[in-house]
């Protein structure tokens, strides 16, 4: 993800938490805040020290970024997304992270259906 697509400042996180909507499952909490006049989506990540050591936390953040990058075309643009990883996310593979995040995104109705390619 590009630098412009990241949420870094505490005030930006607070705005998403206060004004946005949230949806959760066992592994992740997803906050969504639609922003007018914003062309691209932005992503903020929060992984508590309770989840694991720095290596574990960075691995989770890397996997979440990969999933968001892959699903970028199917997500609503013009929104800020904040993902909070919960303890069970520590042991997930990339496939399981993708499945869990897609589940939360479908529940919150921000994930559009993928376009199926026509076979000839």
Image (cartoon, helix red, strand yellow):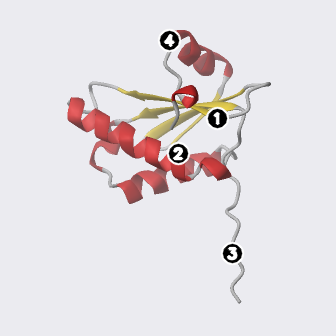
The spot of residue 72 in percent (x, y) is 61, 47
The spot of residue 60 in percent (x, y) is 34, 40
Res. 41 mark? 1
Res. 117 mark? 3
Q: Are marks 2 and 1 in contact (CB under 8 Å)?
A: yes
Spatial CA distance of label 4 from label 2 is 21 Å
Dot 3 alpha-carbon crowd within 10 angstroms: few under 14, some 14 to 19, many 20 or more: few
Q: In this rendering, does residue 26 appear at all?
A: no
**Nearer-N-terminus badge (4/3):** 4
Q: Identify the residue shown where x is 51% and y is 13%.
A: 9
**Nearer-N-terminus badge (1/4):** 4
**Nearer-N-terminus badge (3/1):** 1
Label 3 SS: loop
Q: Are marks 3 and 2 in contact (CB under 8 Å)?
A: no
Q: Identify the residue shown where x is 56% and y is 46%.
A: 104
Res. 10 mark? 4
Label 2 SS: helix
Q: Name the residue under label 2.
A: 68
Q: Identify the residue shown where x is 71% and y is 42%.
A: 76
Image depth: mark 1 or mark 4 in front: 1
Res. 49 mark? none
Spatial CA distance of label 2 from label 1 is 10 Å
Q: Do the residues labelled 4 and 2 touch (CB within 8 Å)?
A: no
Label 1 SS: loop
Spatial CA distance of label 3 from label 1 is 25 Å
Spatial CA distance of label 1 from label 4 is 18 Å
């Amino acid at each position: 993800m590009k630098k412009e697509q990241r949420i870094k400042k505490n005030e930006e996180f607070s705005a998403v938490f206060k004004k946005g909507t949230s949806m959760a499952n066992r592994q992740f909490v997803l906050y969504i805040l639609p922003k007018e006049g914003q062309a691209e989506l932005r992503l903020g990540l929060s992984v508590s020290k309770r989840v694991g050591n720095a290596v574990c936390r960075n691995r989770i953040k890397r996997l979440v970024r990969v999933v968001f990058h892959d699903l970028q075309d199917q997500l609503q643009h013009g929104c800020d997304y904040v993902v909070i990883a919960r303890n069970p996310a520590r042991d997930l593979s990339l496939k399981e992270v993708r499945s869990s995040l897609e589940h939360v995104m479908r529940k919150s109705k921000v994930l559009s259906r993928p376009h199926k390619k026509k076979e000839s």
